[in-house]
Image (cartoon, rainbow, N blue to C red):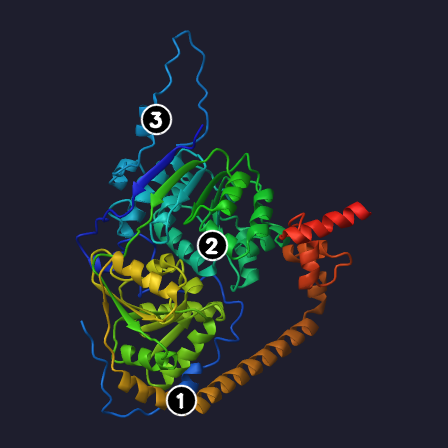
Amino acid sequence: MSDLIYTIDSDEEVALSASDTEETNPDFHFQIDSGTTNTVEEFDFQDKKLAEVDLDAIIQKKGIQLPEDEQAVDESDESDQEVDIPETKEAVQPEDTPEEIANFYEQSTHQSHTSFQTLQLSRPVLKGIAELKFTKPTPIQSASIPIALLGKDIVAGAQTGSGKTGAYMIPIIERLLYKPSTSTKVIILTPTRELALQVYEFGKKLSHHVNNLNIGLAVGGLNLRQQEEQLKTRPDIVIATPGRLIDHIRNSPSFSVQDIQVLVIDEADRMLEEGFQEELTEILSLIPKHKRQTLLFSATMNTRIQDLIQLSLQKPVRIMIDPPKQVASKLLQQFVRIRKRDHLKPALLYQLLKGVSTRVVVFVARKETAHKLRIVLGLLGLKVSELHGALSQEQRLQNVKNFKSLDVPVLICTDLAARGLDIPKIELVINYDMPKTFEIYLHRVGRTARAGRDGTSITFVGESSQERAIVKAAIVNGKGVAKTVDWNQAEQTSKIISSKESVIDEVLQEEKEAKELLRAEMELTKASNLIKHEQEIHSRPKRTWFKGEVMEHLTKHGKKVNAKKRKANEEGRSYKKTKTDRMKISNKKKSK
């Protein structure tokens, strides 16, 4: 029997609250507003050594003086599960005709529930929804919440920003209202710490009026001992990243997953992309399958996701929400043809950002590029922040907080770091480096021009056929114009930047030395603590690591695995890729 599929058009406009529309998130994806501290009060940060390097002070000390008369840039314009029917003496109903089957599976053009009141939710949950200023369920929420409340497994295809956090968190909290709080009942897995923190804050706000409901957090970058102490209290919901969850399952004696009733895998496709396949398999093997309800959310449904579904879910209901295939109607797309002037891109970016007071997101391809641009623009007198994987957890949270509060109006980030973060009221998106695909382009420019607001995107375009194809697709799906820039002014700024390369190198060197000094101080503190608390440390049980066991399994004597040895040991093809190599292997076998 085919899976029951809900398909709903997600392009439908979502109603906003009549009051305070500026503070409402139109995509119903959780946001941390600028008034919050954007930190986790229950935990200290595990690693602060990089955050203590005052890069802004170094940049300010070596700032570049620009000509006062410099001109700004000119602008132009249900499921496979069979229902047990008791045997009766009534006549068997005839099978559905092909026309009836086609009508049943036809794409729905409207939502089943256009109000949270019709979902029959309890008063405490409705109060939490109202405080979040949600006035109408999104398509994914309308389709998922009733099925999740029935306890069925769900596979949902939904993009970031579609309201999927509410789609699983609302029914989870509703179900926990009627269950005694004796052990951890729910685990929510996310691919990144930032997304886990957002889900944690969302859950705390949504459950504000629910008594005796506790939510725990288990992610890297935050104090491990404090997390262990929190898990001892057996919180009802634990939000975690896969690696840290396995660490606690193995090494925290008071934490158990035997009573887990709901498992949520959020952004499953991204988890697999980032190499969490083994961790997910381990977690799924530890949580009893016959006892749990599994909710899996993914933006794409490829072969690896289908394999994960087969492994983790039982006759799931599939809910597919059509993602937007075009840019927002009020987005003005501007394109700057770089040609062979890549060396002018930093200067051109400065020209575009000079005098900006609203939020601007700049997307780059590499974290090294983001860091260097932050230094260059800082030396030129701009307030700029960065967001990428090389930063500590504290630095990332602080940079996002500063950006949301407009203390720093410009955020330079990579795609992986920015994915899953919802930042409101962004008026300009700049693609400093062209995205690899049109889907990534849509994800980037989708940060602005939301809910009928105006927005602008500026993209630096090179000469490759791939980049031209993305531009062509973007223009077909929306309005786009060529942006006129003053290349002579960009040349002058570029010369100033080039003349200060030695200053940039000095900043990088000074930052490196500061980091090394802090690292040495940390090692000294660590050695001192080892001597001071030696007896206590040795009395603790030895921690075990999931990855360590996998690596040991790949070798005969538990030595470090190099690339060649890994390739030889990993299970792969039983034959070589080419016909010639297969013939050679076949001949060798025959000769033996």
Q: Which amino acid does label 1 sit on?
A: Ser
Q: Mark 1 points at which residue?
A: 498
- Count of all numbered marks drawn on residues in the image: 3
Local SS, label 1: helix
Q: How far apart are marks 3 and 2 (CA)?
A: 34 Å
Which image quadrant for residue 476? Answer: bottom left
Residue drawn at 27 percent across, 41 percent down: 116
Locate residue 335 relative to residue 498 in the image: left or right: left
Foreground residue, 307 or 384?
307
Residue drawn at 68 percent across, 55 percent down: 549
Locate residue 187 relative to residue 172 in the image: left or right: right
Foreground residue, 151 or 46?
151
Locate residue 549 relative to residue 240 in the image: left or right: right
Task: Of the two numbered discs 2 and 1 on the same chain, state the one appearing first in sequence.
Answer: 2
Task: Of the two numbered discs 3 and 2 on the same chain, state the one appearing first in sequence.
Answer: 3
Residue 371, x across and y down, in percent: 44, 76
Q: Which amino acid does label 3 sit on?
A: Ile
Q: Mark 3 points at which residue?
A: 101
